[in-house]
């Protein structure tokens, strides 16, 4: 159970039901009132080596921006939702890149406004839309603090149109299993070889637990996908990922193996991530081998074309070998 060291909060959260609940839940935690969750001056001035210490804080406010961004993968729109950031510490986390040192967890208590906009947007389109509500955070993890995902499913299940989707690296799904989700929720479990989970994805669920969660969700009739991400081209990457695919094949239930789909995403990286990792995770695996990367914008990197092409061929072949009837949405 996450217990924050300090809570930074906007005064107006007291006007929302969830805001009141969180203030009561954490009544014994030191609190600092702030003007804007997106501009906490004392946090921005912290040194890189204090990154993990910052992760122990919790920021609570209201989300002011509700812009939907078109997407062409599993969803039609990326939707800002009830949280941003995370209390885990994956060394490649793109939120560190986007928000510099603001990858700590921020909770937004105006959930009614956000869900209402999703429902209105879904209803005004003729085609069925899918909304990605978890691109800025891990909602399975967040749910252990706020119960927001349970609330969302309960309040979305009986709407006329639309589906919601979210990715996760956590196995805390038991509260979702008895819900009447009406098959309107798509949950995608991110997986990686055990070595990468143990040495790169700090604070996340073990591979075994993630697979058990997939089996539970499928049994509860959720639509479930597996995201192999981010693929990291370590020296022995082919061996690591082949063992991962075999492990999935051997440990997924027969029902899961019939229903799951796949996404494969290669790691991207940034100058900011590298600077923080060198100070915070000094004894960890080196995941940035500069000679394998090329630039993709200011201070950002992606694997060179030859590595991505080799990786795509490998994953198409290995997934076809063990999961011949399962859809691969994309490999990028």
Image: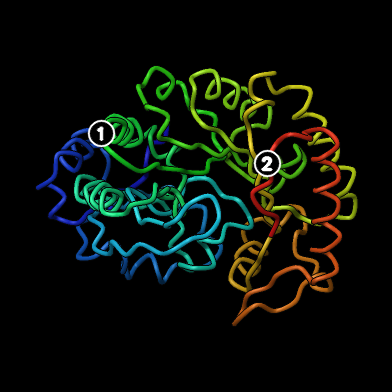
Q: Can residue 168 be seen in this view?
A: yes
- The residue nearer to you, when weighing 212 against 311, is 311
Does residue 11 lie above or below 67 as drawn?
A: above
Q: Residue furthest left?
A: 15
Which residue in the structure is indicated by mark 1?
Answer: 155
**In whole angstroms, how far apart are the C-alphas of marks 1 and 2?**
30 Å
Q: Position of residue 78 (x, y in %)?
A: 42, 57
| Image disc number at residue 278 | none
At 62% across and 22% down in the image, what residue appears? 212
Disc 1 or disc 2, which is closer to the eye?
2
Neighbour tally class for label 1: few under 14, some 14-19, many 20 plus, Cα within 10 Å: some
Please tell me which of labels 1 and 2 falls first in the chain.
Answer: 1
Please name the residue shown 64% across and 44% down the image: 227
What is the quadrant of residue 332 in the picture? bottom right
Q: Is residue 295 above or below residue 214?
A: below
Q: Is residue 153 above or below residue 190?
A: above
Residue 54 visible in the snapshot: no
Q: Give how far across and how far down residue 17 sits, in percent.
A: 14, 39
User: Which residue carries the number 2 mark?
Assistant: 327
Helix, strand or loop at mark 2:
loop
Q: Hey, which quadrant is residue 287 in on the image? A: bottom right
Q: Identify the residue shown where x is 39% and y is 32%.
A: 144
């Amino acid at each position: 159970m996450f217990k924050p060291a300090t809570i930074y909060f906007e005064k107006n959260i007291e006007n929302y039901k969830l805001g009141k609940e969180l203030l009561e839940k954490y009544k014994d935690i030191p609190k600092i009132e702030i003007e804007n969750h997106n501009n906490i001056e004392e946090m921005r001035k912290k040194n890189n080596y204090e990154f993990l210490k910052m992760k122990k804080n919790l920021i609570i406010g209201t989300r002011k921006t509700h812009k939907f961004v078109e997407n062409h993968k599993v969803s039609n729109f990326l939707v800002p939702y009830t949280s941003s950031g995370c209390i885990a510490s994956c060394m490649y986390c793109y939120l560190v890149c986007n928000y510099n040192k603001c990858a700590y967890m921020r909770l937004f208590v105006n959930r009614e406004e956000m869900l209402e906009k999703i429902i209105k947007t879904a209803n005004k389109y003729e085609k069925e839309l899918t909304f990605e509500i978890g691109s800025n955070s891990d909602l399975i993890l967040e749910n252990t603090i706020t119960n927001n995902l349970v609330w969302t499913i309960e309040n979305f299940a009986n709407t006329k149109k639309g589906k919601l989707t979210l990715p996760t690296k956590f196995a805390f799904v038991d509260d979702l299993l008895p819900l009447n989700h009406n098959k309107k929720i798509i949950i995608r479990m991110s997986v990686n070889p055990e070595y990468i989970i143990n040495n790169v994805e700090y604070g996340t669920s073990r591979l075994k637990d993630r697979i058990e969660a997939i089996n539970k969700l499928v049994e509860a009739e959720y639509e479930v996908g597996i995201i192999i991400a981010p693929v990291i081209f370590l020296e022995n990457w082919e061996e690591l990922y082949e063992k991962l695919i075999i492990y999935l094949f051997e440990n997924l239930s027969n029902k899961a193996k019939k229903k799951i789909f796949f996404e494969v995403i290669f790691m991207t990286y940034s100058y900011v991530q590298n600077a923080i990792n060198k100070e915070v995770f000094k004894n960890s695996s080196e995941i940035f081998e500069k000679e394998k990367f090329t630039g993709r914008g200011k201070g950002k990197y992606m694997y060179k074309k030859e590595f991505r092409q080799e990786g795509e061929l490998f994953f198409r072949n290995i997934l076809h070998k063990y999961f011949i009837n399962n859809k691969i949405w994309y490999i990028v």
